[in-house]
Amino acid sequence: MRSFIVLLCLVPTLLLAQQSKLETQLKQAIKDKKAEIGIAVIINGKDTVTVNNDIHYPLMSVFKFHQALALADYMGKKKQSLDTRLPIKKSDLKPDTYSPLRDKYPQGGIEMSIADLLRYTLQQSDNNACDILFNYQGGPEAVNRYIHSLGVRECAIVGTETAMHKDLNLCYQNWTTPLAAAELLEIFRKKPLFAKVYKDFIYQTMVECQTGQDRLVAPLLDKKVTVGHKTGTGDRNAKGQQIGCNDIGFVLLPDGRIYSIAVFVKDSEENSQANSKTIADISRIVYEYVIQH
């Protein structure tokens, strides 16, 4: 009995030592990078590791995940279906931004379901679709209020995609800490925030995400795991640095274990491919740690 009690007392110490090992590996992976890099990992809902979490990182298109959650809450209160159709005018389809939606329907003059617009935002990171949904749900301020209402306060959403493209400095005002992003993923998965039909749709749409296959997903493609994620990619600032290269997601292992991971690369002097590889390397380190412990 005495040995059992001693063992129980040792468990927290062993866990802390293991988490410290992961933190050391992550710091080693980013030490020579010409960028500010923040990481947060939450394993099985409790074991948490962060690196450089005291910095505000530009969300870039990661905020489309935040937007989707606020949208689901808004639709639930309005008792509206994902099949609800919204008009899309030519003036909604801004020319100087990333938009597969505009490329497919350059003249506008159509209607599209909210489900399809969410597929454009969450799977293809379409900027025009994002702003169409912002107009429908009350703008960035409404999204910001909703996310803060969930207890996730270390973030701010103040500008649309159009506004960020007009003023690159606004990208820095749409910010988060890595841990806040990872916590939001946890809340989404574990809490009944809104009707199951909305939750299941967002979950599956993230699993089918088509952007950033060279980031979090890259080292996991042959591992028989389920990955849902949302990327964010920024332009170059006046110094020639990439403002943001990000990916956040959840990873479900075959044995039922799950972890949330958020990686943000800020003001990088590296090229885009190198930034994506850094995220992929971090993803590999975390995956290998989880399966070994």
Image (spheres, helix red, strand yellow):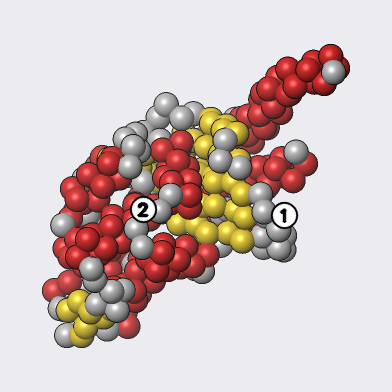
**C-alpha distance separating marks 2 and 1:** 26 Å
Numbered label attached to residue 193: 2
In the foreground, 73 or 205:
73
* In-image side of 169 versus 288 (left or right): left
What percent of the width, then of the height, locates residue 198?
Answer: 37, 66
- Amino acid type indicated by mark 1: Asp
Structural crowding at the residue carrying mark 1, measured as other residues with C-alpha within 10 Å and reported as few (<14), some (14–19) or many (≥20): few
Q: Quadrant of residue 132?
A: bottom left
- Marks 1 and 2: in contact by CB < 8 Å? no
In the foreground, 84 or 34:
84
Identify whether 108 is placed above or below 212. below
Of the 4 image quadrants, the one containing the C terminus is top right
- Residue located 36% across and 63% down the image: 195
Q: Quadrant of residue 72?
A: bottom left
**Which element type, helix, strand or loop, lies under badge 2?**
loop
* In-image side of 277 versus 71 (left or right): right
**Which element type, helix, strand or loop, lies under badge 1?**
loop
What percent of the width, then of the height, locates residue 147?
Answer: 30, 45
- Residue located 48% across and 49% down the image: 190
* In-image side of 82 versus 275 (left or right): left
Residue at which label 1 appears: 255
